[in-house]
Image (cartoon, helix red, strand yellow):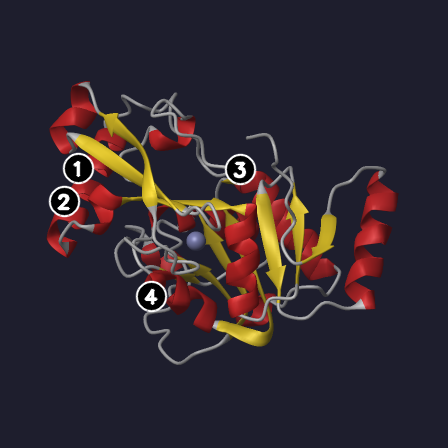
Amino acid sequence: MKCLICNSDSEFLTRKNYEGDFKILLEQNTYMKCPQCGFSFSKTIQEMSDLEWEELNFGFHKLLESQKFTDDINQPPYIHQANLINILSKLGLIDLQHSLDYAGGHGTLTKILRNYYGSDLPVYDPYVQDDNSNSLHYIEEIKGKKFKFINCSALFEHIRSESDLDEIASLVDEDGVLMIHTVICENIPADPNWFYFVPPVHSAFFTNKSMDIWMEKWNFSASVYCKDAKSWLLFKKDSEALQNSIKEVNSLLQSQFLIHKKGFVDYWKGF
Ligand SMILES: [Zn+2]
């Protein structure tokens, strides 16, 4: 099977056999790895029909709701993400007037921004909407639209095809910013017990090199990493003003709150 990022032939990485409740959902996941860019993926999930994939996700979320696995599943660091978005907006580095929380589900981040920061982040999610969605700003149709700021949290690890990624990137305006939260590291280990292989619905695993290639494909020139929010911001346009703003924030906070780099910030090199 071909790598979704660089189109090289992939190789077998490892296989995970599930136990207990997970095994009822899925017997095993076979993971493949690209020898060129390191991007890894579940062959099992890529080969599923859309219906099988939907059923796996439905079953997995039902298990989560039963709260059996709350200790094992890391939720996104919402308050840190909201804080980051607020600071970037105040600095004029992102434009919340033309923004979107892509696959934002129940709108948790939007509610935090609204309740504690007084700003709005419209939500798009074709699959999940909050029961009380009247109070949230849902966008129903996004085809052909462009946004200045898109948040895409905990989604990259669930993509199954190149077109899933292309759809997200194609929504970002030519001077826009894409914020992503997922695990991105130097190397995906051939270890079935690796923490990111635990949820059977994780299908895609990005490396620093694969992100560099993907950014180039979609004309993102620089990125910024915030370790508190465990999130990257991919900027279409780099500028001196952007770099100076980051220096000012770090100086005021007396910490490396934001890290800037041309290309992708390869913060996690441990593996
Ligand atoms: Zn590749």
Give the amino acid type for the residue marked by disc 3 in the picture. Answer: Pro
Which is closer to the viewer, label 4 or label 3?
Answer: 4
Labels 3 and 2: the sequence-earlier one: 2
Q: Amino acid at mark 1?
A: Gly
Say whether disc 4 or disc 1 marks the residue closer to the N-terminus: 1
Residue 255, image x, y percentages: 81, 37
The residue that mark 1 highlights is 59
Number of numbered callouts drawn: 4
Residue at 45% x, 73% y is 170
> Where on the picture, by quarter, is residue 161?
bottom left
Element assignment for label 2:
helix
Q: Is residue 45 above or below residue 235?
A: above
Disc 3 crowd, CA 10 A, few/some/many (<14, 14-19, 20+): some
The Cα–Cα distance between marks 2 and 1, rounded to whole angstroms, is 6 Å
Q: Earlier in the sequence, mark 4 or mark 2?
A: 2
Can you see residue 110? Answer: yes
Which residue type does callout 4 highlight? Answer: Ser
